[in-house]
Structures are given as structure tokens and as C-alpha cells.
Image (tube, grey):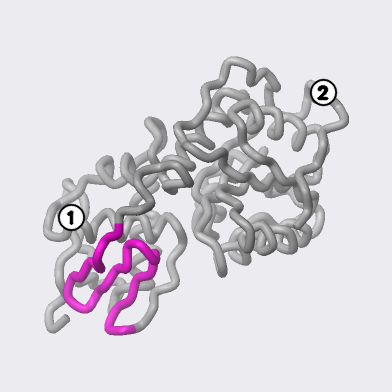
Amino acid sequence: MPMPADPTNTHAAADSGASASPGTLTAPETATPPTILVVDDDASMRLIVRHVLEAFGATVYEAVSGRDALAVAPAMAAARGPDLVVLDVGLPDMDGAAVCRAFRTWSRAPVLVLSGRHSEAEKVRLLDAGADDYLTKPFGAGELAARVRARIRAAGVRGAPSPTVRHGPVRVGDLVLDVDGRVATRAGRELHLTRIEWEILRTLAVRAGEVLSHQDIFDTVWGQPFGDAVKSVRVHVTNLRRKIERVPSAPELIVTVRRDGYQLVAAAGG
């Protein structure tokens, strides 16, 4: 397993897309520092991100290409992480969406995308590929740190509430969620979900029968005070329905309650 690279330059390029002034940032509330993989071919940007993350005690690993990241990450997973991936989409060898999709085949760790592309279509494309958050350049060190903290809280990274507590499976008709194992099945068939899809389904399942608003779901899953709750939740619920509903266009599990939000109900005959 590769060791974290030692930074050799303490001054970042002024035009690299972020402000390197993390000295006043507060640490995330975790008992064990998170392990974070930074994927970017720009050395100055990697240095800036490293400074921000190390300011609150994170252990940082680096990869300079998509293939490098996909080679490094499984070795990290075998040991203890990564707890989060910071991914630049403009890599020289692979499209960022392809890296996300490949990463999602074996890990639910949150992925924070960095990009200079501001279009809504690009953001939706990356989120659909498995990313959990999207930060456009230029950005400030404070915003980067806040988003990383939010993603770590939402993912329940080490040190978040009581890992010794065990939960029984949640059953809603023929839908079964193993909360501790983070596995969902329907009629005995395992559902292959992204981390966001899993968190939305878990949030609905543990409160099955209740109507949850877009904002309720957004606050629970994304764990951040900003963002378009309606649009973000709708995109991921649509993708989730494609995976769990018999007829996605006529959902019987995740039901839309007009103007209010969503409700998880037991399917007829389930």
C-alpha cells in the first residue's frame, strides 16, 4: 500500500482554482482521523487540497490519474479506507464519470468531485455516475473543508455514533435492508446501489409509512445546509426506482406524495 506523499512545495499556484488558507478550519467530529484519497493530475491542486485536509488531521493519499486511483484504492480498502475520495474530473487518462462508476463497483465511500465545468448537465452526469457532491472551481479552502466534513458525517465515518450498536434487518414487504451490512435485497435479489441511493432507501425504510419531504431526505442524506434539495433528491430517487421497482414508471414501493415528498410502502403482494 502506497504511503501518503510528502508535499515538497508549501506555496500553491495562485491560479490553481482554490485558496490555500486552511489555518482557521475546525476539525470534523470524529474519534479517528479519516483517510482520504485525492485524485488530480495537477500537483499544485493536490497540494492545496492536501493542506486543507491535513489541517483537520486527515491522512491523505494521492493519485495522479484515474488508473492510478483505481489501482491504489483497493489496497487502501483492504487496510482501512478510503473514507472519502476527492476526484478531479479532468484527468489525462479517464473521464471522471468512468472513475466514479468503476469505484462504485466495490465501495460506497463518498466521492467529492472537483471541476471547472459549471453546467447543470455535467453535475447531473457525475452525480448519476456515483459522485456524492460536486464542487466547482475556483473554490475556497473553507468551503472545501465544510463539504468534506459534511460528507464524512453523512457517511458515518469512524468515530461517528457507536459502532458497537447492532441493528436488525428492516423489512418492508419483500424489501429487506441489512443496515449493518449495508445490503438491500428485494425478493431475495441483491440491489446494487450507490452510496446516496442506499442512504435514501435506508432513510425511507427506517421511517416506512411516513411521508418525508425532499428537505427531510436531503438534510439526512447530504448532511449540508446548502444545495437544491428538490432537484438533488428527485434525480437520485428516479435512479433508485430503476433499481428497486418492478415498473419504475409506476412505482409501488417509493410513492410520490404530491407537493409533500416520498413515502416507502409495502408493495401489493410483496
Residue linked to disc 1: 207
Q: Mark 1 or mark 2: name the one nearer the start of the chain.
A: 2
Q: Is residue 230 visible?
A: no
Instruction: Tell me: 173 left or right of 81.
Output: left
Magenta region, residue range? 166-188
Instruction: Tell me: 117 left or right of 104.
Output: right
Point 26% across, 73% down: residue: 176
Residue 223: percent from left, percent from top:
38, 39
Point 58% across, 15% down: residue: 24
Pointer 2 local density, CA inside 10 Å: few below 14, some 14–19, many at least 20: few
Q: Secondary structure at mark 2?
A: loop
Q: CA distance from mark 1 to mark 2?
A: 49 Å
Instruction: Tell me: 195 left or right of 199.
Output: right
Q: Are marks 1 and 2 in contact (CB under 8 Å)?
A: no
- The N terminus - image quarter: bottom right
Q: Secondary structure at mark 1?
A: loop
Residue 142: percent from left, percent from top:
56, 23
Q: Is residue 106 above or below residue 87?
A: below
Residue nearest the observer in this picture, 195 or 30 = 30
Residue nearest the observer in this picture, 28 or 144 = 28
Decide whether residue 192 is among the magenta residues: no
Residue 162: percent from left, percent from top:
35, 47
Residue nearest the observer in this picture, 240 or 178 = 178
Point 78% across, 25% down: residue: 15
| Residue 104 badge | none
Q: Is residue 126 visible?
A: yes
Residue linked to disc 2: 10
Residue that lies at the very extreme toward the front in this rendered image: 164
Count of numbered circles in the view: 2
Point 38% across, 51% down: residue: 163
Residue nearest the observer in this picture, 34 or 270 = 34
Q: Amino acid at mark 2?
A: Thr
